Amino acid sequence: MKTVYFHPHASEEMNHAAAWYESQQKGLGKRFLATVQDCIQRICINPAIYHEVYPPFRRGLVHKFPFAVVYKVVRDDIQIYAVMHLHREPEYWKYRPLE
């Protein structure tokens, strides 16, 4: 099993989006998090499943929500750099410091 590492801002983005969805409808935030986790599972099973959008970064689409997981593979690890909204500043994460 691959180890998954979150950039601190990616974790923040995911939790912020989940809180917003939960404020809109009870249980929706939990569904959002579960759907993001499903996307991450697909990435772990087959890291090359999604195409490179900005090499070496790939973008996995989150089903049923307008979000994507931006990640790169480093040896046997998955490094998640963003959990991004697809309709808001889609390339902001490129300028994020690598941590």
Image (tube, rainbow, N blue to C red):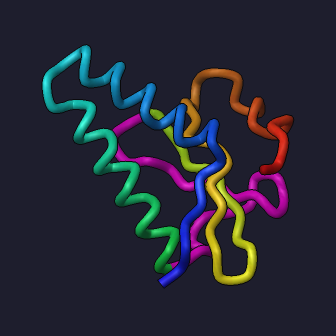
Q: Say above or below: 20 vs 94.
A: above
Q: Quadrant of residue 60?
A: bottom right
**Residue 69's spot in the image, x, y percent?**
56, 49
Q: Say above or below: 46 vs 17.
A: below
Q: Is residue 49 magenta?
A: yes
Q: Is residue 8 left or right of residue 23?
A: right
Tell me the magenta residue range. 46-65
Closer to the camera, 36 or 7? 7
**Residue 94's spot in the image, x, y percent?**
82, 40
Q: Tell me the residue at 46%/61% (across/down).
A: 40
**Residue 54's spot in the image, x, y percent?**
82, 52
Closer to the camera, 81 or 70? 81
Q: Tell me the residue at 31%/39% (across/down).
A: 32
Q: Say above or below: 48 vs 50.
A: below
Q: Is residue 48 magenta?
A: yes
Q: Is residue 25 left or right of residue 75?
A: left
Q: Tell me the residue at 53%/33% (across/down).
A: 12
Q: Is residue 39 left or right of residue 95?
A: left
Q: Tell me the residue at 45%/26% (across/down).
A: 16
- Count the marks: 0
Q: Is residue 22 left or right of residue 4?
A: left
Residue closest to the far top: 24
